[in-house]
Amino acid sequence: MVSGSGSNLQAIIDNVNLGYIKANIELVISSKQDVYALKRAKENNIKSVVLKDDVKKMLEVLEENDIDLIVLAGYLSIVDKKIIERYENRIINIHPSLIPKYCGKGYYGIKVHKQVIRNKEKVSGATVHYVDNGIDTGEIIIQEHLQVNEDDTAQTLQKRILEIEHKILPKAINIVIEKLKF
């Protein structure tokens, strides 16, 4: 599930193509029309659909496509509790901070990095976690940190953390696949 440029989606696609992730990407669901992630899906012959706030339709689409694992890769909508219940411990999310810091309502994208810089943090990073009924409150699967440089801006920090996201999201997918024995 995506909402933007799809760089994390591309990292997943690349890792599937390299054989690192031993799974198929069956479907890309976007919460927004005209995002670059949809172009990435099309270029890689991956079925895609735009859905927002239609829980019944989303459950239908997930069932029709026989989805085993849902990966929120820059998905900026809150997943409805009916979907979370149906896919319990099979929905994961990438977040651009070291949870429990800078997470929850209102903490996404560049806002996270601005707060890290504003608070003069020495360390930041990214987290992949299970999705539960809270916002960024699910069990942590994997985290990786980096040192915040004195000359970092929110934008430079975001770029450096995105590199971490591209590395740990495929690792987390493999951890979950192994755990669930797909």
Image: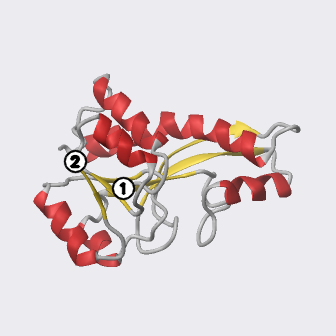
What is the number of the mark on residue 74?
none
Question: Quick one: SS at disc 2?
Answer: loop
Q: Amino acid at mark 1?
A: Met
Residue that numbered label 2 is attached to: 47
Q: Amino acid at mark 2?
A: Lys
**Label 1 close to label 2 by CB (< 8 Å):** no
Question: Where does residue 61 sit, x and y in percent of width and height?
Answer: 18, 63
Question: Where does residue 150 sit, x and y in percent of width and height?
Answer: 88, 38
In depth, the one of 45 and 24 nearer the eye is: 45
Task: Say whether residue 180 is left or right of residue 146.
Answer: left
Binning the other alpha carbons within 10 Å of mark 1 as few (below 14), some (14 to 19) or many (20 upward) gives many
The quadrant of the image that shows the C terminus is top left
Task: Say whether residue 32 is left or right of residue 70.
Answer: right
Q: Is residue 62 above or below residue 135?
A: above
Can residue 145 be seen? Answer: no
Question: Where does residue 98 sit, x and y in percent of width and height?
Answer: 63, 51
**Sequence order check, earlier mark of 1 and 2:** 1
In depth, the one of 135 and 46 nearer the eye is: 46
Task: Say whether residue 166 is left or right of residue 171.
Answer: right
What is the number of the mark on residue 1?
1
How far is the residue under mark 1 from the one under mark 2?
12 Å
Question: Where does residue 163 sit, x and y in percent of width and height?
Answer: 58, 34
In depth, the one of 50 and 79 nearer the eye is: 50
Residue for point 23% across, 37% down = 45
Residue for point 37% across, 29% down = 14
> Residue 122 sits in which quadrant?
top right
Binning the other alpha carbons within 10 Å of mark 2 as few (below 14), some (14 to 19) or many (20 upward) gives some
Residue for point 59% across, 40% down = 162
Can residue 39 be seen? Answer: yes
Question: Quick one: SS at disc 1?
Answer: loop
Task: Say whether residue 87 is left or right of residue 14.
Answer: left
